[in-house]
Amino acid sequence: MFGLKWRALPGLRAGDWRSKLIAVSQALIGFVALLSTLAMLTRDPLMLLGVTAVQLLILVGVVLYVVVAIFAQRTMVLEEFDSGEMIFSEGDQGRHVYVIKSGTVEVLAKRPDGSQDVINRLGPGDHFGEMALLRKAPRSATIRTVTPVQVFKMNPSNFMALYTSLPGLRDHFQKVMQSRVREFELRK
């Protein structure tokens, strides 16, 4: 369609989410530009009004994205761990939320006999540590690195500011937390 080939957008084929987001944004802006031109040529007041509304929504979305990105960048600290290190242990007080930049971690839960089971593995883009903050309870699992890991660490007040102000983020964390609680209960 319109002569667009996948080889022109290598990031889409490779699965890089940032490239996909940029490509979709550019396509949307191009489509709105075409609609704007059509609206001006036809001088249709309803079409002009609709295009203006869409442009305002895009602008609001871009501004919100930039605000959240700047806030996250300024509030997160990059930390590095070698393989085999404990990031935190079950029973610890929850002090931070972590987002994995690179590497792999294991989620370990204690059995009644004191041994630990690997209940999950997390990789780049995954997060952990939010359950203790949201539930105001001690850590429910131990996190141990499998490979060298880089994580972004966010303190509770900054996490809660994002959590309470962004409904989509709040919904995501609630769904993930419910899923993890179900997994944890099934393992017991």
Image: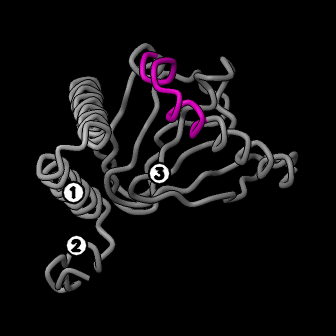
Is the magenta region chiefly helix, strand or loop? helix
Q: Nearer the viewer, residue 76 or 160?
A: 160
Q: Quadrant of residue 43?
A: top left
Q: Let me know if residue 77 appears in the view.
A: no
Residue in the picture at 28% in, 56% down: 21
Badge 1 is on which residue?
A: 22
Residue in the picture at 56% in, 60% down: 121
Residue in the picture at 54% in, 46% down: 143
Badge 2 is on which residue?
A: 11
Q: Residues within 10 Å of mark 2 (few under 14, many from 20)?
A: some
Is 180 one of the magenta-colored residues?
A: no
Q: Are marks 3 and 1 in contact (CB under 8 Å)?
A: no
53 relative position to 127: left or right: left
In magenta, the rendered stretch is: 161-173
Q: Let me know if residue 68 appears in the view.
A: yes
113 relative position to 71: left or right: right
Instruction: Give the CA separation, mark 1 to mark 2.
Output: 10 Å
Q: Nearer the viewer, mark 3 or mark 2?
A: 2
> What is the number of the mark on residue 64?
none
Instruction: Give the CA separation, mark 3 to mark 2.
Output: 21 Å
Amino acid type assigned to the residue bearing label 2 in the image: Gly
Badge 3 is on which residue?
A: 126
Query: Is label 3 in a helix, a strand or a loop?
Result: loop
Point out the tag, 1 or 2, that comes first from the N-terminus: 2
Amino acid type assigned to the residue bearing label 3 in the image: Asp
Q: Nearer the viewer, residue 156 or 91?
A: 156
65 relative position to 98: left or right: left
**Vertical comparison of 146 with 159: above or below:** below
